[in-house]
Image: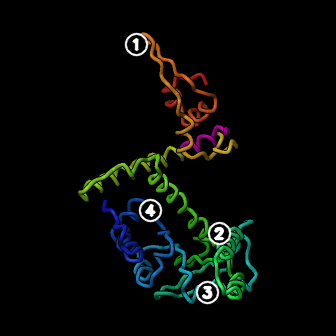
Amino acid sequence: MQEANGNANDKTEFLNIIKSHIEQLKNDHNIEYIIADSALYTEKTISELDSKIKFITRVPENLKATKTAIKAASSSKLIKINDNYSYYETTSEYGGVIQRWLVLYSAANKKQEIYKLTGEVSSKISAKKDLSKYLGYFVLATNELDAEELSSKDILLEYKGQNKVERGFRFLKSPQFLTDSFYVKKPERLTSILMIMTLCLAVYSSLEYKIKIGLLLIGSYFIDQKGKDTQRPTAKWVFEYFSGIHLLIIDSSKKIILNLKERQKIILKALGNIYLEIYDCTEF
């Protein structure tokens, strides 16, 4: 494993990382698509990727072609995906690569952008009013030209799947993970810490997935941070909910689990018998 340089330019670093691992990802893990934000979308990168793998990426907003596509979409009839997203599909060529472009409109994004826009102090009010009709739009691109292989809706779903990965790395950076308490000088020690952190994230994500599938299979719910029932609790919340449980050992032989509540037993049941046995609640 080679850690990326945080001071490097993402537009060049992304290509180097992908080129280093693309064959292994395809052969060992059957990766079909590389999904990334707009830093991936450069002429050199997509030109090199096109012959190696399919990609789904956001198109930078500062490209002239992006602005043209958004203007065309704003005056066209959009196809509704759900209450938040609608889209207009077109084709484009950039870096010598023919692509499908999905021009998406998000009502939620527009609200956020209007809030930012009205919150700024500017003398160019008229210019802002002219821009407002294009708020909420963004463009996704893919070199998968077969809509039967990858539908327009799936382009959006695959792209939004990045949030799961980003949420995991936010967890690694959170104060609860105590990452800022480590200080090392040698690069190889930093690499070791990153490897351990990545392994922790893999365990964390696996547990979260196992809980979700388990709750679905047994038809049970767990409460979230707002006190509402959910079948998709975060592992972080489950960890917090399990704090305060103690093991009481009497005469070196009898063991009693203290403070184990019914809600916690639901999680144990979702995880399986081995977890129920550890907490001595197989009768649940």
- Tell me the mark number nearer the camera, choosing from 1 and 2: 1
| For the residues bearing labels 2 and 4, Cβ distance under 8 angstroms | no
Ranked by sequence position, the earlier of labels 1 and 3 is 3
Q: Of the numbered discs in the image, which one, if any, rests on residue 47?
A: none
Q: Position of residue 92 (x, y in %)?
A: 56, 86
- Tell me the mark number nearer the camera, choosing from 2 and 4: 2
Q: Give me the C-alpha separation between circle 1 and circle 2.
A: 60 Å
Q: Is residue 98 above or below residue 167?
A: below
Q: Which residue is mark 3?
A: 67
Q: Which residue is mark 2?
A: 153
Residue 105: in sight, yes or no?
A: no
What span is in magenta? 210-222
Q: Which residue is mark 4?
A: 30
Q: Is residue 28 above or below residue 70?
A: above
Q: Give me the C-alpha separation between circle 4 and circle 3.
A: 35 Å
SS at badge 2 = helix
Q: Position of residue 216 (x, y in %)?
A: 64, 43
SS at badge 1 = loop
Q: Is residue 15 above or below residue 94?
A: above
- Tell me the mark number nearer the camera, choosing from 1 and 4: 1
Q: Amino acid at mark 3?
A: Lys
Q: Is residue 182 left or right of residue 104?
A: left
Ranked by sequence position, the earlier of labels 4 and 3 is 4
Q: Give me the C-alpha separation between circle 1 and circle 4.
A: 51 Å
Name the image quarter holding the C terminus.
Answer: top right
